[in-house]
Image (cartoon, rainbow, N blue to C red):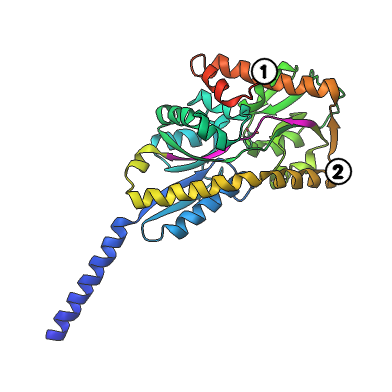
Amino acid sequence: MRQVLSMSFAACLLAAAAGATNAEEVTLKGITAFAEQTFYSRGFEKFIAKVNADGKGIIQINYVGGPKAMPPFEVGNALKTGVVDVANDTGSFFTNLVPEADAWKLTERPMSELRRNGGFDFMAKIYDQKLNAILLVRHIDGNPFHLYLNKPITKPDLTGLKLRITPVYRDFFQALGATVVQTAPGEVYTALERGVVDGYGWPITGIFDLGWQEKTKYRVDPGFYSAEVSILINKNAWAKLNDAQKKVISDAAAWLEAQAQDIGKENAADTERQKAAGIQVIAFTGEDAKFYHDKAYEAGWVGVLKQNPETGPKLKEFFAKSD
Ligand code: 173
């Protein structure tokens, strides 16, 4: 009898200990606006792996996936409302909620400088107010966008071309005369295959992830702007974490931001890979290159200032290169 009693006492203790551990370990729901295991999700996946290793017993992220789990343009709202806790996303996918977020593309200074000059904090405050989110880390930077085409052009004039866009490219491509149609990345392949579009905007990296090299004849150089992808956490979810849990998240974010410096190698590797895949380069030089570059920034800022008459001038001060 005595032995039975002490055994059940031990079982109770064990159960209590297990309960206590469960109560302390928080599991956050994580989602990405880009396809799983593709270039723009990879940083997030490394971040999750680090949090789950360093946070054993206190904090974990449950990775629910990418566009198969949720349409990319809905991720911002899901984060804002707490349907998900952590998101990997780019500002141009939630301009309906944060019009300023599209201005990241116009940064001509590295993140280390934007952290020092107040630009990061200024944008973080806007995310706090309009997205109910904390901006943890921009892990894609120094990664230019390009125009990819299936019809050749000889000068920076896009009249008569129908191009796939997101808000990133809208003002610029329209300023050069193009007709534009917005789609999520997941619809680009079919749009090219069916000839619904003559080309698309996308950064220098990642076209192989979705097989677009099969349907792409030309890339236009030079590239323009700087692609941004960041990891964000819902404010309410953050507020519920204790200091140790917050530290796991913050340390993983800082670790990832430090690695974003290496993107030049990835840019070069995909440039080579595009060449090997037979994608021809239409390279503007001299006056045409200058016109194309200047038009990108001019049209981009006109758009951002028009959308954000109050915050836009301040963003330009922080983000644009001073002459
Ligand atoms: O073209 C896009 O879908 C887009 O806007 C984007 C932004 C950041 C990284 C990759 C693509």
**First to last magenta residue range:** 221-233
Asked whether, in this view, residue 104 is left or right of residue 274, the answer is: left
Amino acid on which the number 1 mark rests in the picture:
Ala
Q: Residue at x 52, y 50 (%)?
A: 255
Label 2 and label 1: CA atoms lie apart by: 31 Å
Above-or-below relation of 306 to 62? above
Amino acid on which the number 2 mark rests in the picture:
Gly
SS assignment at label 1: helix
Q: Residue at x 59, y 42 (%)?
A: 34
Single out the residue that lies furthest toward the left.
Answer: 1
Asked whether, in this view, residue 272 is left or right of residue 301, the answer is: right
**Is the CB atom of the residue marked by disc 2 within 8 angstroms of ligand 1's nearest atom?**
no
Identify residue for label 2: 278
Q: Sort mark 1 into few (<14), some (14-19) or many (20+) by Cα contacts within 10 Å.
A: some
- Observer-nearest of 170 and 238: 238
| Quadrant showing the C terminus | top right
- Observer-nearest of 204 and 28: 204
SS assignment at label 2: loop
Instruction: Based on the picture, tell me whether residue 226 belongs to the magenta stretch.
Output: yes
Q: Which mark is residue 139?
A: none
Identify residue for label 1: 299
Q: Sort mark 2 into few (<14), some (14-19) or many (20+) by Cα contacts within 10 Å.
A: few
